[in-house]
Amino acid sequence: MRANLPQIKQWLNTLDPNIDMTLLCWEKTTDKNYFCHRALLVKFVQKDRPDCFGGCDVPNKVLVKV
């Protein structure tokens, strides 16, 4: 992650607080070693771009499979 910090900071600078964005996770939540990388991105956005932070998580049970 540290090696990619410049690219992450560059991406953060491109965010527009007026445009909605959703971070999706495809990790298996049933895996005992489950870790969602969204948590790392959320920390960066929350710290470096609080103007872009907000919204809510949608629990898996609410999602409709198509």
Image (cartoon, helix red, strand yellow):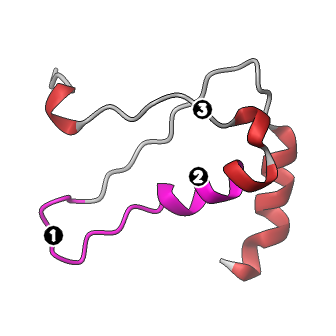
Q: Which residue is nearer to you in this view: 29 or 47?
A: 47
Q: Which mark is residue 15?
A: none
| Mark 2 secondary-structure assignment | helix
Tell me the residue at 19%/58% (across/down): 29
* Badge number at residue 54: 3
The stretch of residues the image draws in magenta is: 28-45
Residue picked out by circle 2: 42
Any mark on residue 31, and which? 1
Label 3 or label 1, whichever lies nearer to me, is 3
Secondary structure under tag 1 reads: loop
Q: Residues within 10 Å of mark 3 (few under 14, many from 20)?
A: few
Q: Earlier in the sequence, mark 1 or mark 2?
A: 1
From the viewer's side, name the closer residue of 13 and 58: 58
Depicted 44 relative to depicted 21: above or below: below
Where's residue 5, x and y in %?
Answer: 78, 71
Which residue sits at x=79%, y=44%?
49
Asked if the residue at tag 2 contacts the one at tag 1, i.e. Cβ–Cβ closer than 8 Å, the answer is: no
Q: Residue 27, located in which quarter of the rendered image?
A: bottom left
